[in-house]
Amino acid sequence: MATDAQIKIWKAKHKHIYEIEVLVGDENEKAMGYFKKPDLKVISAAAKFADSDPIRSGMIMFNDCVLEADERISEDDEAKLAVVEQLGKLFRRKVATIKKI
């Protein structure tokens, strides 16, 4: 588990940090990981494989965004996919409007 000091360092570098908890093992155990928000560069790299190889796409996202993760997450494919699903929810388009003036 990351210390408050480590989280402060990550926030200074990446701005947004997320703690993702995954149920592992017999699903009564929890494993924790800390991740930065994916940026446009990562989304673009992952999108190249979204249709042809969605697993590869997800691993690009996971590997780029992970700051620290319990080894049970890193070693368990189902846990990784659960994290990838949550990471995908972090990058959302903002709403914009246009008006001719």
Image (cartoon, rainbow, N blue to C red):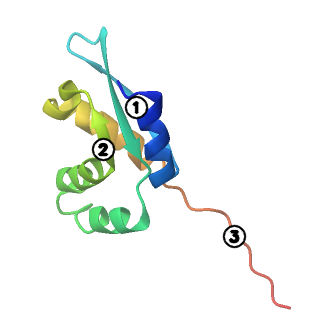
Query: What amino acid type should be assigned to the residue bearing mark 1?
Result: Ile
Ranked by sequence position, the earlier of labels 3 and 1 is: 1
Against 96, residue 67 (above or below) is above
Res. 22 image quadrant: top left
Query: What amino acid type should be assigned to the residue bearing mark 3?
Result: Ala
Give how far across and how far down residue 91 sits, in percent: 48, 54
Nearest to the eye among marks 1 and 2: give it.
2
Q: How many marks?
A: 3
Residue count near mark 1 (Cα–Cα under 10 Å), binned few <14, some 14–19, many ≥20: some
Q: Which quarter of the rendering shows the C terminus? A: bottom right
Nearest to the eye among marks 3 and 2: give it.
2
Residue located 52% across and 51% down the image: 15
Residue 71: numbered disc: none
Q: Nearer the viewer, residue 82 or 16?
A: 16
Mark 3 lies on residue: 96
* Residue 36 located left or right of residue 81: right
Q: Which quarter of the rendering shows the N terminus? A: top left
Furthest-left residue in this view: 75
- Could you tell me how far apart the alpha carbons at marks 1 and 2 are, in whole angstroms? 10 Å
Residue located 56% across and 62% down the image: 93
* Residue 90 located left or right of residue 101: left
Mark 1 lies on residue: 20
Q: Nearer the viewer, residue 27 or 63?
A: 63
Furthest-bottom residue in this view: 101
- Could you tell me how far apart the alpha carbons at marks 3 and 2 are, in whole angstroms? 30 Å
Give how far across and how far down residue 53 sits, in percent: 17, 58
Furthest-right residue in this view: 101
Residue located 28% across and 12% down the image: 27
Res. 23 image quadrant: top left
Ranked by sequence position, the earlier of labels 1 and 2 is: 1
Residue 66: numbered disc: 2
Residue count near mark 3 (Cα–Cα under 10 Å), binned few <14, some 14–19, many ≥20: few
